[in-house]
Amino acid sequence: DVVMTQSPLSLPVTLGQPASISCRSSQSLVHSDGSTYLHWFQQRPGQSPRRLIYKVSNRDSGVPDRFSGSGSGTDFTLKISRVEAEDVGVYYCIQGTHWPNTFGQGTKLEIK
Amino acid sequence: QVQLVESGGGLVKPGGSLRLSCAASGFTFSDFDMNWIRQPPGKGLEWVSYSSPSGNIYYADSVRGRFTISRDNAKNSLYLQMNSLRVEDTAVYYCTRGWYANWGQGTLVTVSS
């Protein structure tokens, strides 16, 4: 199975400051069709997860443009340009290239 | 708008069975891949099972042989039949659409004696 490793696991951030979460895979996430199926989710306390970014860098509808995704191959990053209070929660990456699809462990973002 | 509503969770003894349902609306259900994801209390997300419109099905190793995913396109519904339940299957179970674009509110399954 593909192992997804997120870092850091805990991320205290001052309001208005940037934040960055890394997600590394144990093998390339480039599919035979040429696409890279790496997606990012936010789970606010008490809520269901919500997809923020799909296929590495495509922002979902309604997601603020302070969220961005980048990366290739085995190394991916979610960035928040300026953290707001509503960004508190746990962030997960998932690879959808290989079966079984696998999630990262989650990164808990809190306000410092 | 897309809506996914899970039901069927509850308290069951180890070795017992449950059938989860996911009622879908707001999109053409028969056109979309669907997945079940679970989350044990206070822990992270785990992919459980996948169903494609063409009939492809996949399972996580942890549930293969015990869980069965199915879909009824006429009823716009996704199901998860869970047999031989174990304590470690305790989790909130979510159904999701496509590349996990949409999630339901989840249904809690508790396996305990």
Image (tube, coloured by chain):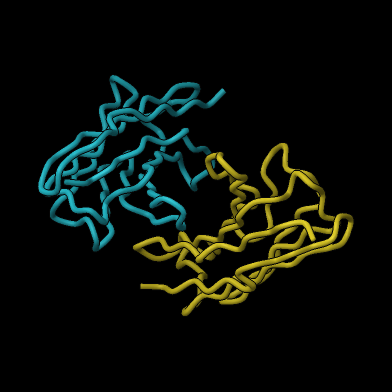
Chain colours: A yellow, B cyan
Q: Does residue A63 appear to the left or right of B36 in the view shown?
A: right
Q: Which residue does the image show at 79% across and 62% down from the upper left?
A: A13
Q: Position of residue B4 (x, y in %)?
A: 44, 29
Residue A83 image offset from top left, x and y in percent: 82, 54
Q: Residue at x 48, y 25 (%)?
A: B27
Q: x, y percentage for residue B2?
A: 52, 26
Q: Is residue B93 above or below residue B30?
A: below
Q: Residue at x 40, y 33 (%)?
A: B31
Above or below residue A92? Residue A60 is above
Left or right: residue B65 versus residue B74 is left
Given residues A33 and B101, the one toward you in this image is: B101
Pick out the residue farthest to the right: A16
Which residue is found at the position 25% from the left and 43% from the top? B55
Quarter of the image for residue B19 reads top left
Instruction: Please give left or right for residue A75 compared with residue A20 in the image.
Output: left
Residue closest to the eye, A94 or B32: A94
Q: Position of residue B102 (x, y in %)?
A: 52, 38
Looking at this rendering, what residue extends furthest in the bottom direction?
A26
B104 vs A57, nearest the viewer: B104
The quarter of the rendered structure image containing the N terminus of chain A is: bottom left
